[in-house]
Image: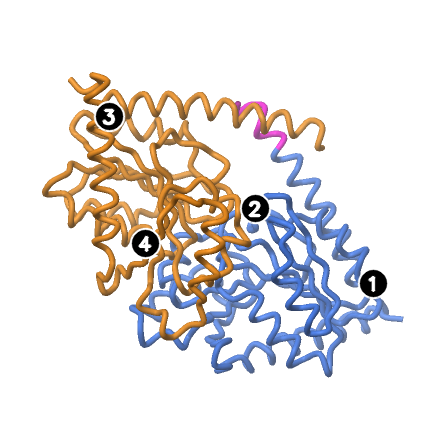
Chain colours: A blue, B orange
Amino acid sequence: MTETHVPIVENILSANDRLAEQNRTVFDEAGILAINIMASPGAGKTSVILQTVQALSPQLRIGVVEGDTTAVTIDADKVKQAGIPAVQINTGGSCHLDASMLREALSQLPLEHLDLLIVENVGNLVCPAAFKLGTHANVLISSVPEGDDKPYKYPRIYRGIDVFILNKMDLLPYLEFNMDYFSKGVEILNPQSPILPISCRTGAGVHLWLEWIARRVQVQQSRLAAHGSIS
Amino acid sequence: MTETHVPIVENILSANDRLAEQNRTVFDEAGILAINIMASPGAGKTSVILQTVQALSPQLRIGVVEGDTTAVTIDADKVKQAGIPAVQINTGGSCHLDASMLREALSQLPLEHLDLLIVENVGNLVCPAAFKLGTHANVLISSVPEGDDKPYKYPRIYRGIDVFILNKMDLLPYLEFNMDYFSKGVEILNPQSPILPISCRTGAGVHLWLEWIARRVQVQQSRLAAHGSIS
């Protein structure tokens, strides 16, 4: 099984990488910053997206792609109710988004009229790490009740992350969560990437994330303007 | 890609099913009840296992197989410290256990001297659902902070479960979690399976689970004795 299986997986991954590069070109030509949000189920991906949309849509034009394993549109509906263009990718039971799925979703979004595209990956701390999407930044949302040992247990997805959101900080008083142990695990894998402690429920710390993402959009737009990509 | 890919996946799954049947035979011949514990990362799989081992090891001989995506032995070490035979399967980054991995682990356990084998699957609400292991019962641990919508969003893994543990009930006062909505989602997929609300942290409700699992071991041993499988 291994002999026939492994080369096929390698072919799929390298085909995916090529499509991811094409997606990146699409984003750059449209003047968009695209981010890939990953997390365990229930860590708060959709809540962070909703807070982002509500706070920043007056100043930024935002689009959202929701990755789900089924046709259930719980998350996409919430985003659409906030008045934001949203497309759902139904992975058909598959455990991650890939570059080809994202490319198909992009055709249904008004890319030329967006500044920021937020991609919500499937809730999973394993598989999404293996598939590049072509986005400019990887965001990982951890949550306090998941426990402080997750960077040590799921190192592959904790690596190559540009910014960490640590959500559900309001539950800290009720749990044993060693912040130093968690932070050390993150820093070993990503010495440069900040950890932003927030609570979507109380709103505490959310401004840290809003500042981070607004600054990244600005940097992206300056970069593209310098290269003459934005008409 | 689809044309060449799908038959290979089907072959892998049917080969896995055959190995799962062989594992089942091994369990039955050894007079063991084997259970497959699945959950999202951080829902409390290892905590439930530790509570089970501590409470029941005076009356039951228990072994544990820990599935992890890396060689980090955080969970297996905790179980071993409780004086219980434990084997870790390092899936090498793979997102689930399969029957072949479990078979290899079984060779390292004193099966003839066990009553209950607990298999802790990889923390993931998608992939483990697709791979039978040959165990007698599927246990899904949900946790209150994950949110009440998980049965609707991950229906594949919520289907075919024999008992649901709803952990971290002590956090209920601090969260919006609609128990009726959660229970309804579970019941649509599994009309017969109980939901056991517990808190590993406070110990509340854990006796419900201990009673369930002790009874299942008893039923299995009576069934095997009636068939003359236990020497």
- The image quarter containing residue B219 is top left
Q: Chain of mark 1?
A: A
Judge left or right: residue B30 versus residue B134: left
The local crowd at label 1, few if under 14, some if 14 to 19, many if 20 or more residues have their Cα within 10 Å, is some
Q: Residue at x 69, y 26 (%)?
A: B4
Are marks 2 and 3 in one subunit?
Answer: no
Q: Which residue is mark 1?
A: A29
Label 1 sits on a secondary structure element that is: helix
The disc label shown at residue B223, or none: 3
The mark lying in front, picked from 1 and 2, is 2
The residues colored magenta run A1-8
Q: In the image, residue B142 lies at what x, y percent?
A: 40, 55
Magenta span includes A2 = yes
* Image quadrant in which the C terminus of chain A is located: bottom right
Asked whether residue A23 appears in the rendered view, the answer is yes
CA–CA distance between discs 4 and 3? 25 Å
Mark 4–mark 1 distance (CA, rounded to whole Å): 53 Å
Badge 1 amino acid: Glu
The disc label shown at residue B100, or none? none
Q: Residues within 10 Å of mark 4 (few under 14, many from 20)?
A: some
Label 2 sits on residue = A95
User: How packed is label 2: few (under 14 Cα within 10 Å), some, or many (20 or more)?
Assistant: many
CA–CA distance between discs 4 and 2?
A: 27 Å
Q: Is residue A168 magenta?
A: no
Q: Which of the two marks, 2 or 3, is nearer to us in this view?
A: 3
Residue A212 x %, y %:
60, 76
**Disc 4 designates what residue?**
B196
